[in-house]
Image: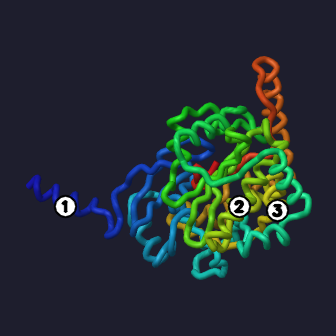
Amino acid sequence: MSKNLQLVSDIVNKPPPGIANIEKAEIRIKGKTLHVPSIRMNGRTVIATGKWLKMAALQDEDFLEGQLLDDPAAFISGIKQGSLRADIFAFRQKLPDVKPKYDFYFEWDNIAAIPIVSFDDWWMKRVSHDLRKDIKRAKKRGVVARLVEFNDDFVRGVTEIYSETPVRQGRPFWHYQKDFETVKRETGTYRESSDFIGAYVENELIGFIKIVYVDKLGCLMQIISKIAHQDKRPTNALLAKAVEVCAEKNLSYLTYGKFRYGKSENSLTAFKRRNGFEEILVPKYYIPLTLKGRIALALRLHHGFVAMLPAGLVVFLIRWRNKIFNWVRDLKKSRGGLGNESEFSEPQATQKKAADSEDAV
């Protein structure tokens, strides 16, 4: 009798075809490693994040090759039958596929991208005379941007960059004082499909870029430079080299997360525009999986509380947040001798990316 009951239990608890049991997937958000519920379906990992509203998404969506979903309707049906317990499933079309393909509810999302025609096209048509002067200035001041091997010497240089200052752009820096092994593990993802470009002054690594290649796209996962050398414009030199590498590989686009975050532009958007990135809109689909998901979508709660605030108020709050962090930084500097913040740091991957994601940052 007990064997029959066990057999019934196994049948009831068996996931739908193509779906594995609930597992834990490792992601990084704001530099912190988290383990979130996930399931495997048709060769894809679906993760669930959030507290009161559970959002499901493809893990590392921006770095998946090929068609994301062969049959979205069947895939969504599988998520509903599975044990992930998410309220909304969201996925985005990939470049260059910008025309809506599916009948699901969608909103326009944005991507920061440089269309790759040739290096000369970017140099002469997509960036200003001032930007070209900065890149030439970097070269005159001894900056050499080149492809580098991912090895222990490179990781030690990255660790040194991360530990230069605890504050960047008025915010605590996520990677500050991470140890060598952590930096090596987090920076070394997607190594089989990545290139690393280092900016050097003599033998010192003063900045680097990580590019992950996905189909005909070059996706920037990380970009950062030392504050002490920002007068040498290493970040501009790195981006110029990244465009050159993508052109040599005959890629279609070099992408760098979102073009704008939220309702207003910030210094990162201005930085991207100055370096030749443009905003490209792509459809992002939101499919409710539960009654809570349908209500949240109808009330536009799926973007979180901050997205509901007026743009002017968000800018005001961000400025005050930065003032507070800068005050704390200056206080610590007076006591312990910390460095100044940089004018620019990487965003965030997204993504989950994530990075973007990445470790998106």
Residue 173 in the image: state x and y as whole percent: 69, 38
Residue 350 is situated, as x and y percent measured from the top left of the image, at 63, 55
Residue that extends furthest to the top in the rendered view of this protein? 335
Q: Nearer the viewer, residue 96 or 142?
A: 142
Query: Which quarter of the figure has residue 178?
Result: top right
3D distance between C-alphas at marks 3 and 2: 12 Å
User: Tag 3: Cα neighbours inside 10 Å, few (<14), some, or many (≥20)?
Assistant: some
**Amino acid type, residue under disc 3 in the picture:** Arg
Of circles 2 and 1, the one toward us is 2
Q: At 26% across and 62% down in the image, what residue appears?
A: 12
Helix, strand or loop status at disc 1 = helix
Q: Which residue is mark 1?
A: 8
- Figure quadrant of residue 7: bottom left
Task: Report the quarter where the N terminus lies.
Answer: bottom left
Q: Is residue 184 above or below residue 69?
A: above
Residue behind mark 2: 258
Q: Is residue 173 visible?
A: yes
Q: Residues within 10 Å of mark 1 (few under 14, many from 20)?
A: few
Amino acid type for the residue under numbered disc 1: Val
Residue at image location 76% in from the left, 57% down from the top: 262
